[in-house]
Image (spheres, rainbow, N blue to C red):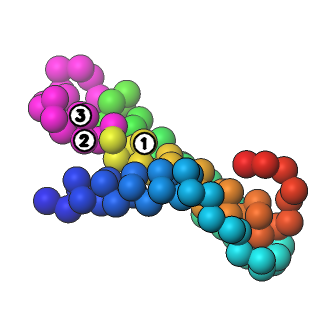
């Protein structure tokens, strides 16, 4: 069961970085920044398509998932959202954007 440790690691890393606010890397590379932002969007598309296929595309009677599974899936989707925010923030920084993200 790798799902719960993966969710926990993503959440712990995200919130530690959020509260500690470490120094950003001093590298400015516009191309790599755009690649990171592109990957962040792909991760978000993956998460939204997973949500769609699990919860929206199915009929309610076809959803044979226990409540724990639904909560785990929602926690996974939230973790992917946090990871997407982090990759996008790093991409914006690498482009050289001075806006606070």
* Magenta-drawn stretch contains 61: yes
Q: Which residue is mark 1?
A: 78
Task: Measure the alpha-carbon separation of dots 1 and 3.
Answer: 12 Å
**Residue at (30, 60) in percent of width and height:** 6
SS for dot 2: helix
The stretch in magenta equals 58-74
Question: 101 left or right of 8?
Answer: right
Determine crowd level at label 2: few under 14, some 14-19, many 20+ residues with C-alpha closer than 10 A.
some
At which x and y percent is residue 71? Answer: 25, 34
Determine crowd level at label 3: few under 14, some 14-19, many 20+ residues with C-alpha closer than 10 A.
some
Question: 99 left or right of 60?
Answer: right
Tell me, yes or no, whether the two marked residues, 3 and 2, touch with CB atoms within 8 Å: yes
Task: Measure the alpha-carbon separation of dots 3 and 2.
Answer: 5 Å
Choose top left, top right, bottom left or bottom right for residue 90: bottom right
Identify the disc placed on residue 72.
2
**Residue at (84, 50) in percent of width and height:** 99
Task: Please tell me whether residue 48 is drawn above or below residue 93 in the rendered image.
Answer: above
Q: Which residue is mark 3?
A: 70
- Residue 84 in view, yes or no: no
5 or 58, nearer to the observer: 5
């Amino acid at each position: 069961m790798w799902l719960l440790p993966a969710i926990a690691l993503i959440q712990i890393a995200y919130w530690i970085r959020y509260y500690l606010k470490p120094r950003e890397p001093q590298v400015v590379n516009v191309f790599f920044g755009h690649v990171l932002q592109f990957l962040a969007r792909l991760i978000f598309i993956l998460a939204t398509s997973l949500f769609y296929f699990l919860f929206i595309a199915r009929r309610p009677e076809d959803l044979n998932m226990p409540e724990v599974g639904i909560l785990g899936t929602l926690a996974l989707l939230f973790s992917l959202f946090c990871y997407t925010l982090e990759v996008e923030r790093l991409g914006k920084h690498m482009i050289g954007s001075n806006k606070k993200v």
